[in-house]
Amino acid sequence: MQRETWTNWARTETAHPRRIATPASVTELAALVADAAANGLRVKAVGSGHSFTGAAVTDGILVSLDRLTGIDAVTPTDDGAHVTVWAGTRLRALNEALWERGYAMRNLGDIDAQSIAGAIATGTHGTGARFGGLATMVAGLEMVLPDGAVVWCSPTERPELFEAARIGLGALGVVTRVVLDCTAAYAMHAAETSDSLDATLERLDEDRTGVDHFEFYWFPHTRRVLTKRNTRLPVDTPLAPVPTVSGYISDELLSNVLFEGINRFTTALPQTIPAVNSVTARVLGSREFTDRSYRVFASSRRVRFREMEYAVPAETLTDVLAEIEGWIGRTDYRVAFPVEVRFAAADDVWLSTAHGRETAYVAVHQYHRRDHTSYFRAVEDIARAVDGRPHWGKLHGRTRDDLRTTYPRFDDVVAVRDDVDPQRTFGNEYLERVLG
């Protein structure tokens, strides 16, 4: 039979499933999963395809949840609401719908194209030393198991399944609904400025712990960075968003159109990268604005790239960056993409990259037309030396044998998987590598 073709956003993974299914109800999905399992076919759910890994790849049934979207229920709490969301809902649409109801996510990453289930399953996070990733906001999950059973799990109902499934990598079942612990809506003030790496590292502890959402971008081959300090404000704060024209110039022309051109140019002439990075770091300049929180969190990313991100103990960050800079200098490797640094609070999610420790995230990128292999391998070695943990949805070379030593609850996740999916209906090569 002729197979369909699916490719992820980064074009790092391609699948040829027997068919792509788009069920319109949980009942339809449950019947599809049960039938596939009975016939020995694997099943994988897919969202926006933003993961760089093969987490969603299958030769069986690829399930799109694009018809299971929207907010299903809202239950007010003392400081916000528990909001039940259909799994296929894109973050962009969810943020708008929450705002209309007076609520917001407690933290967000800088990409809002993902589905809520996909973002949670791969450990998507934002930045802020007092805030956890998206999985820490999950209060309950509805899932379809391999036999077609539809179950709810929470801290009190099937708690071990809940703990494993909060970042489940798609290994335990197909998530159909998510209960999110949302906060009251809030505005945010953004202050972005160019600075030196040395000055940024000198006041790192102050910014990391004193700013609600702090991050910075270091431009390799220079000592320059772009810092972002986002401060939470009451929802009734007068908004002063980025003006349309200047926003288009900065966020579209400079960050996408010009940056694409720069990467095409430097791919042909890599020796120009140090000079180009020096200019780029200064051209981005400074700006301030105040807007709805989710609009400040999100950025437009249209230049295609490869990415690897490692979570390292926060106290090791300065040494990790120094090691990366040293490797680049010794090898004369050229990279035009900045290194992105973010932060997160310690949490208790079993497969969270911030499990049990205050965390700094170091993300490295390479333009999709250039080879990233040696760069990513070197950074991975540097991060592993300080017990770094790779982002589950981004490129890495880790396997079960060396991952289980860095996650205290790793074997518990494997045990839950063995219990609910012993036949590996939801398995694939990526999961075999990282979970066994």
Image (tube, rainbow, N blue to C red):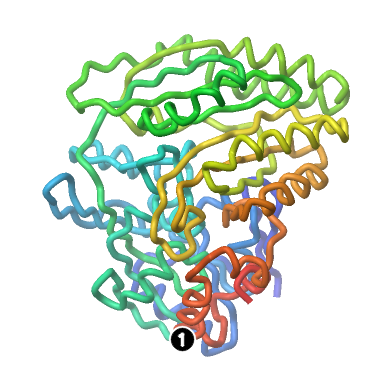
Residue drawn where x is 71% and y is 50% of the image = 380
Figure quadrant of the C terminus = bottom right
Figure quadrant of the N terminus = bottom right
Which residue in the structure is indicated by mark 1?
Answer: 419
Q: Taking 232 as reference, is 373 left or right?
A: right
Density class for disc 1 (Cα within 10 Å; few <14, some 14-19, many ≥20) is few
Residue drawn where x is 56% and y is 21% of the image = 226
Residue drawn where x is 28% and y is 54% of the image = 180
Res. 337 image quadrant: top right
Reply above or below: 364 against 17.
above
Nearer to us in this view, 169 or 251? 169
Where is residue 114 shown, x and y percent of the image?
47, 47
Where is residue 376 shown, x and y percent of the image?
74, 46
Decide if residue 117 is in sight here.
yes
Where is residue 31 shown, x and y percent of the image?
41, 80
- Residue at disc 1, secondary structure: helix
Q: Single out the residue that lies furthest toward the bottom.
A: 38
Residue drawn where x is 48% and y is 40% of the image = 343
Decide if residue 112 is in sight here.
no
Q: How many marks?
A: 1
Reply above or below: 382 against 282.
below
Nearer to us in this view, 14 or 83? 83
Nearer to us in this view, 101 or 400? 400
Residue type (three-letter) at the residue carrying disc 1: Asp
Where is residue 348 shown, x and y percent of the image?
39, 60
Reply above or below: 175 against 336.
below
